[in-house]
Amino acid sequence: MKKFLFAAVFLLAFQHGFTQFTILSPSARISVITFGPSQEELYTAFGHSGIRVYDSLLQIDAFFNYGVFDFNQPHFYLNFARGYLNYMVDAYPYQDYLIYYKEHHRFAHEQVLNLTSEQKQKVFEFLANNIRPENRNYFYDYFYNNCATKVRDVFKDALKNEVAFDSTYIKTNYTIRQLTDLYLGQQPWGDLGIDICLGLPMDKKASPFEYMFLPDYIESSFDHAMNSVTSQPLVKSKIIVYEPQPELAAFNWFHPWIIFGIFLALAALLTWRDWKLKRISKWFDVTLFLVVGLVGVLLLMLWTLTDHKAAATNFNLLWAVPTHLVLAIALLFKQRPRWVRIYFLITTILSALLLGGWYLLPQALNVFLIPLVAVILLRGLVNLSQRTLATDNADYHR
């Protein structure tokens, strides 16, 4: 404990600019650390990467973490919503991190790198310079500039052309969305939220280099990398520091298929009743199109008013049409505007085409949404079928 306390004090010192006096000893080692995923939260589902600098002679055992953010930053939540994700790198005693991840049953793998003394010093100085107050912040991007890609870029930038990644081991041809989905099997609501909010940019085919936005692919990519200076594999040894027993996911009734399935069944029942009684359940339509319209407004704002590049060109706007919000307001009027019938006709046609061409779109829409779009289609059809509703309010059911 004394050693790690000393290390923490030392790290605090070189954060204030004293690293130029620090020369790593010949026994120092630099490692890439990969921590496993966890299903506790959405943001932990993808795992985590960092860099460990260990020098027993200098009593340094530092974990450099590029996944740090400060809630106390001015306008943090506003900037986060707008896409100005201001993350930072910091260094802490490695053992503290290890204890935390063990307590949360997340695996820890260490890849000790096969670097020359000169290369170790370059990487260490690069990291030490990065955590200086004037250098530590960076703009985070979910897929292109995150805590995993930063680990890759440290060696790419500090060692220039001295590290060569061999991407031929990757045999898959996944899109970024498909790579994300690999980790969200136990997070269906998180998967749904991501698929709703993020648009067509997520459906580009990822290059092997881009696979490294995921910590698992940082680990496997370093396993297949070479040190161009020594002509040897970049990873000298691999240590399984901690490997928890796999836990079976418990069945959860609160699943999108179940919730949206029940919603579709109830909506179908209500629609059948409306058709039989030649009336419309206005309360249902107002609620449905109000909620869907608000979702559409949110998606449009994410696309046009923020810096979330992955939220652009979102085909979910084909069902979450922002003008549905106007329709919901119009349905509250005692006398329906004449354009409402035409609007329902367009909505019905659009919903039918969307369901028919679900798998033909360039953007992969989440299948959990199919029941919701089916409900929109049903409500459009039943509103069109009641032709007298536009003029005869006697049959209009509140």
Image (cartoon, rainbow, N blue to C red):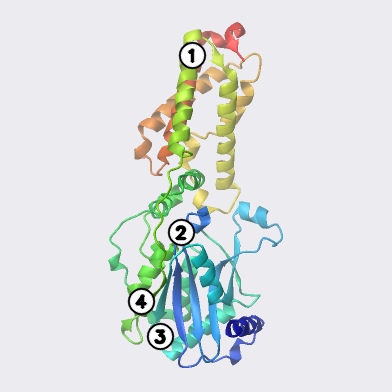
Spatial CA span between label 2 and label 3: 28 Å
Label 4–label 2 contact, CB within 8 A: no
Residue at 49 percent across and 47 percent down: it is 190
Spatial CA span between label 4 and label 3: 13 Å
Residue bearing mark 4: 164
Above or below, comparing residue 4 to residue 211 in the picture: below
Label 4–label 1 contact, CB within 8 A: no
- Type of residue at label 3? Leu
In this orientation, does residue 72 appear? yes
- Type of residue at label 2? Phe
Q: Give the number of the disc on residue 3.
A: none
- Could you tell me residue 71's position as x and y percent? 67, 60
Residue bearing mark 3: 115
Could you tell which of marks 1 and 2 lies nearer the N-terminus? Answer: 2
Spatial CA span between label 4 and label 1: 66 Å
The quadrant in which residue 176 appears is bottom left
Residue bearing mark 1: 273
Q: Which element type, helix, strand or loop, lies under badge 4?
A: strand
In-image side of 288 versus 248 (left or right): right
Quadrant for the N terminus in the image: bottom right
Residue bearing mark 2: 46
Label 2–label 3 contact, CB within 8 A: no
Spatial CA span between label 1 and label 3: 73 Å
- Type of residue at label 1? Arg
Could you tell which of marks 4 and 2 lies nearer the N-terminus? Answer: 2
In this orientation, does residue 350 appear? no
* Pointer 3 local density, CA inside 10 Å: few below 14, some 14–19, many at least 20: many
Residue at 31 percent across and 83 percent down: it is 232
Q: Which element type, helix, strand or loop, lies under badge 1?
A: helix
